[in-house]
Image (tube, rainbow, N blue to C red):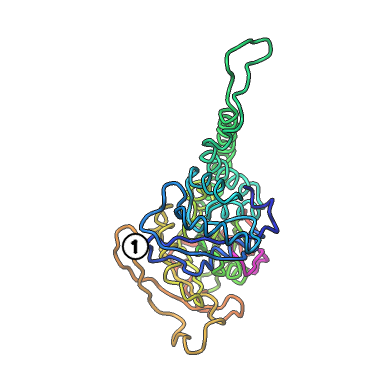
Amino acid sequence: MDVRQTVSASVILVGVDLGSANFDLKLEELGLLAQTAGLTPVARMTCKRKAPDAALFVGTGKAEEIKMMARECGATEVLFDQSLSPAQQRNLERTLDMPVNDRTLLILEIFAQRARSHEGKLQVELARLQYLSTRLVRRWSHLERQTGGAGVRGGPGEKQIELDKRMISESIKRTKERLTKVKRQRQTQRKQRERRNSFTISLVGYTNAGKTTLFNALVKARAYAADQLFATLDTTTRQMYLGDAARSVSVSDTVGFIRDLPHGLIDAFEATLQEAAEADLLLHVVDGANPEYLEQIEEVQRVLAEIGADQVPQVLVFNKLDAVENARRPLHLSDMFEVTDPVSQTVRSLQRVFVSARTGEGLPSLRELLASQAGSLPVDGDSPRLDEAVS
């Protein structure tokens, strides 16, 4: 079901603890995602299982509890924090007699709402099509096989599901072709920056860590920023002049990551995420005021490894220093922080800087650090000294 068609829908949030160390007991992140999509959470339910039920994910008894809760709360939809198989989704909808969606579709719908650029819309559309292509199994079982063409007697034609599969397959093919052109354009832009010996910096991090606010503070831009999940999806690149290094650098603000980011989105956003994989330096922005920042750092490191950006030099920027309680404020605004590589499980030390993008605290130290990093690359005399968009 299209979340965008149920802007005022009241939903029940359901989470199943399968023994994961990162299980969100209060379903806070799912609730924020639901609100971001325009949904209203009216109740929450969690349960523990050793493994998902093959038919209903939560089992027959818990499914009945959800149905009773929906009646009591007046909910019109159920939202699961985990990904459901097409069969589980179909069975749950039949049992609960209401739409059932999962975290994957919710994130896809939010991306569809927020994408603004032509590239972003294409990327989201591809991910949505790939997701929907797996949901066609017996979804239209009530429709009979279509008859043959005009003038043809007897002989069955295509089933509705076969028509839908073919249409989606053709749409996926067209969208991939259009994205290939966009990818070539981005590669051309990167080659132009390489010829100018341009030092490239990409901001990465968990969603709502304050990447865009930091980006605006560094390059004096006015990119849209808000205290919500996935406030911006489209990569924006600006030039920033570093006086201490006597040169300009390219700074890119990229899409935020999140736990269980659908693989279809990672694949579809390959062209955008390449900005991070091919950067000279990554500014990994962390919400320093979030008590779960360690889990968020781990998730970002996992995605970076998945897109081949785990070997790019990295600086941790602990943002939102203004929101940290006085008792938890760091003694020094710069130190070293150990992170674990998700692939090799080796530990490495990264430079860490504490800043507040909102108040400007710590930004001078961050600029000095960037200047020292950028100073290692030969200066191109033709580098522009201005804050202008390059893409």
Indicate yes or no whether the magenta region holds residue 226. yes
For the point 60% across and 53% down, which residue is it?
A: 111
Residue at the farthest bottom position: 327
In the drawing, does residue 89 fall left or right of residue 344?
right
The answer to which image quadrant residue 251 occupies is bottom right
303 or 129, nearer to the observer:
129
Tag 1 secondary structure: loop
Please tell me which residue lies in front, 179 or 384: 179
11 lies above or below 271: below
- How packed mark 1 is, by other alpha carbons closer than 10 Å (few <14, some 14-19, many 20 or more), is some
Residue type at the position of mark 1: Asp
Tell me where residue 283 appears, x and y as whole percent.
48, 66
Hey, which quadrant is residue 385 in on the image? bottom right
Main secondary-structure element of the magenta-colored stretch: loop
Residue 72 image position (x, y, % from top left)? 62, 63
As drawn, is 381 to the left or to the right of 116? Answer: left
Residue 372: in magenta span:
no
**Residue visible at 65% across and 15% down in the picture:** 149
- Highlighted magenta segment, given as a residue range: 220-230
**Closer-to-camera residue (50/334):** 50
The percent coordinates of residue 23 (x first, y second) are 43, 65
Can the viewer see residue 334?
yes
Residue 384 in the image: state x and y as whole percent: 60, 61
Q: Is residue 192 visible in the rendered structure shown here?
A: no
Could you tell whether 232 is left or right of 284 in the image? Answer: right
Q: Front-most of 241 and 288? A: 288
Q: Which residue is mark 1?
A: 341
Instruction: Count the numbered circles shown.
Output: 1
